[in-house]
Amino acid sequence: MRFLSATRIFSGKEFLSDSTVLVLNTRGQIEDLLPAGSIEAGRLEHHEGILLPGFINTHCHLELSHLKDRIARHTGIVDFGLAVIRQRNAVPEEEQLELMQQADREMAASGIVAVGDISNNALSASVKQASSLYYHSFVELIALNPERAEQVFGAGKTILEAFRRAGLAASLAPHAPYSCSKELIRLITGYDHSQGLPTSIHNQESKAENDFFIHKTGDYLRLYESLGLPIDYFAASGKSSLQTVLETFQKDAGTLLVHNSFSDRSDVHAAQKTLNKLFWCLCPNANLYIENTLPDAGLLISENCTLTLGTDSLASNSGLSILAEILTLQQHFPQIAPEALLKAATWNGARFLGIEEHYGSLEKGKSPGINVIDPVRGTVKPLA
């Protein structure tokens, strides 16, 4: 048995009494939470810092790990996307797998215990099978042309089955409003809801996304022209991208909106009113890397949005650390209580992925992983 105490203990939901002791068995499972006075002082393993459950990274692109340091910062989303398209297959699969394994180990070392991972193919399945982390793969589909919806949906289910045969959790996910027709999003979200699965979508990562939907203007026109994709069939809705596609989601399905850099109060109100199991994922370091901007985290907190955190990919980030994302948000939004960010990094992420029975909180019988944050040094150390 291990008897862990710390300067402060965060349960995943709230700070516990400073005198709390966490009792772990040899398998890393929580046996009990006891008052310090009931344990002999010599048996206590005390840590300076905040003890809390393992981190949940709800948005990652493991398969882009080979693109680290290959794409310039602050290019904007269109040039970033074009660079990913040009370079994602420029490295042999063997090297891609090796760098995925390295990224997986980096996440484990930074205290991450579970990952919601965007996958455009099943190449990462072998890495995830061998990992100590829990993975839920979101098979990402792309087709703005509604005539391609059925074909792309069918291909996506084939990839989905490859993950399932590997014994891995997976569901389908539309890439973004600007790259998926309403028809495709309906097929995806309807299927996921029928299977009791969560879904995820990149949302309002750039101003250009809203310009495209409101006026059919902006930088996304250059994207489609660069890719040689005619979009005569697309008509501006006069509304933001999020408000245009909200109707395509299932009201009672777990839905993750990722990035949200240009979501305003009207978008937040509309989404909160429409969807009952809605989560808002923030990946601030990626937003700074690509667009050099940040989502209005203060607005999301003030509107009682359920936040989660993600790292995005090594193509758009210098590392895969949830603590680094927390520190960035604290720097730019000092008014947000630490409890809100720690809850986003643990309990909320576990709830979205549907793994809260095992992860996300310090409760008897769980094996959520245990981290200690040193707030002075800005470091994290996994203990179990």
Image (cartoon, rainbow, N blue to C red):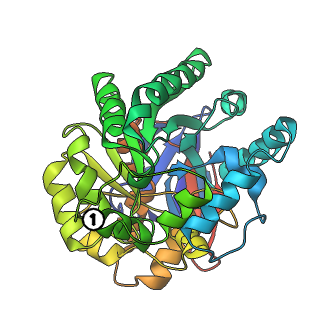
Q: Position of residue 118 (x, y in %)?
A: 55, 43
Q: Quadrant of residue 269?
A: bottom left
Task: Tell me which amino acid carries mark 1.
Answer: Ser
| Left or right position of 384 against 247 | right
Question: Furthest residue to the top?
Answer: 165
Q: Nearer the viewer, residue 374 or 346?
A: 346
Q: Position of residue 149 (x, y in %)?
A: 41, 32
Q: Quadrant of residue 26?
A: top right
Q: Is residue 36 visible?
A: no
Residue drawn 54% across the image and 75% down it: 291
Q: Residues within 10 Å of mark 1 (few under 14, many from 20)?
A: many
Q: Position of residue 150 (x, y in %)?
A: 41, 26
Residue drawn 82% across the image and 36% down it: 93
Q: Nearer the viewer, residue 44 or 310?
A: 310
The local secondary structure at tag 1 comes to loop
Q: Nearer the viewer, residue 44 or 7?
A: 7
Residue, disc 1: 240
Q: Position of residue 194 (x, y in %)?
A: 28, 23
